[in-house]
Amino acid sequence: MTDLLISPQQQPGRPDGPSLAANRAGDRLDRAALRELAYHSREVLKLGQAENGALIACPNFPVYRYCWLRDGSFCAHALDRTGQPGQAAAFFRWIGRTLAGQEGKVRSALDRHAAGETLAATDFLNTRYTLEGSEESGNDDWWNFQLDGYGTWLWAFAEHLRRFPDEKLREELLPAVELTGRYLAAFWRLPNYDCWEENLEDIHPATLAAIYGGLTAAARLYPASEVCQQGKKQASTLRRFVKAHGLESGSLVKSLGRLDVDASLLGAGVPYGLFPPRGKTMLTTLDRIANELVAPDGGVYRYRQDVYFGGGEWLLLTAWLGWYYTQAGQRKKALDCLHWVARQARPNGEMPEQVAHHLLASEHQKPWEEKWGLAASPLLWSHAMYLILYTALFGEGYL
């Protein structure tokens, strides 16, 4: 794990912090500074990958020194987009090995569920794993039973093979894909934690969108797999369910039965495609997010009642909004998001999880810092989303 704690500025030939910061005069950065930060972000992802392929969420934040399938999948996608397919493939192979070790747990959960038993949270797959691929062994309980990461890895793996066809890898990971497909098809109707690891008792359209994106991607990738084709049918049922229960006044809502909106709902359009990105449902949802969750300086909140570390503005969500704008044909707004994210990078180039410029609940910042320390930095998911937006604007493989 020590190699994962090394900052890119400590590597031979890397730009130092002051030169990176010197290009940030004014509100907008020049193209060279944006590119330098993209290069740096790619290095952060590469240094955050263990030899076995696992991608750490944050090397300097103890409770994030694990691998989340969701975070890692977006990091792998960013590596693909910046010319590092070998490292992305290593991550997907890590998932294959990790899920092979969980096969007994999945089969037991499926059998018991089919028999009508009520399962406990510990009966489901974990949200995070150690870099070695085992369930976390810490003393603190975590917020397990979270489905979005399992849908996200299927989507990201299909995107990887679309860019870099590899029949051997496709066949190698078929067992993991089918195991995940069975798991998601069986349990998508159950309440589970959202992508922020909150609200266990709710059903979340953003989570359902990730599941939809994963199941439909798996079906395209494995047309001869009966499991994957059955998953596609479940995805169609899921979409009808969201249309019937997950909308309010034409907009997707944070959770069924609630009226508020969550920035993670961007994923329902980009990248998971639950609804067309330029269709009425997503444009209405996009308008709500832009009107209700964008801070005065342009950063994006998770949701209005957020109290985590005081409820700050999230870099990855601002980049995600920009990514959406690129797909909606609004390039200027996408560039504004890119520049905002770039300005939040610290002098050494590290990108935190969130910043505290306009906190929603400032009284909650100190208690979280006393519990876990300062907000996580560098967060690999923040760097990954910057790269995804950067390449969406300027082209893939440019670095």
Image (cartoon, rainbow, N blue to C red):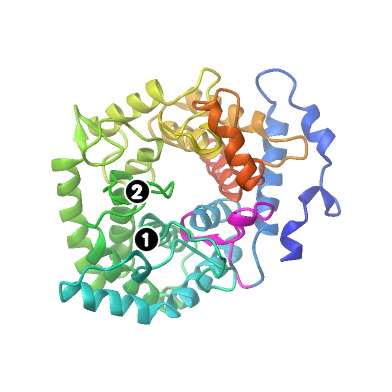
27 relative to 62, above or below: above
Q: Is residue 226 visible?
A: no
The residue closer to the viewer here, 146 or 3, is 146
Q: Earlier in the sequence, mark 2 or mark 1?
A: 1
Image quadrant where residue 173 sits: bottom left
- Span shown in magenta: 52-70
Q: Give the percent coordinates (x, y) of residue 233.
A: 17, 61
Q: Is residue 22 visible?
A: yes
Label 2 sits on residue: 272
Does residue 66 belong to the magenta stretch?
A: yes
Image quadrant where residue 342 sits: top right
For label 1, the crowd category at 10 Å Cα-Cα, with few meaning under 14, some 14 to 19 and many 20 or more, is many
Task: Determine whether, in the image, residue 204 is placed left or right of residue 366.
Answer: left
Q: Secondary structure at mark 2?
A: loop
Q: Residue furthest right?
A: 12
Q: Residue furthest bottom?
A: 104
**Amino acid under disc 2:** Tyr
Which residue occupies 60% across, 28% down? 356
For label 2, the crowd category at 10 Å Cα-Cα, with few meaning under 14, some 14 to 19 and many 20 or more, is many
- Mark number, residue 145: 1
The residue closer to the viewer here, 47 or 294, is 294
**Amino acid under disc 1:** Phe
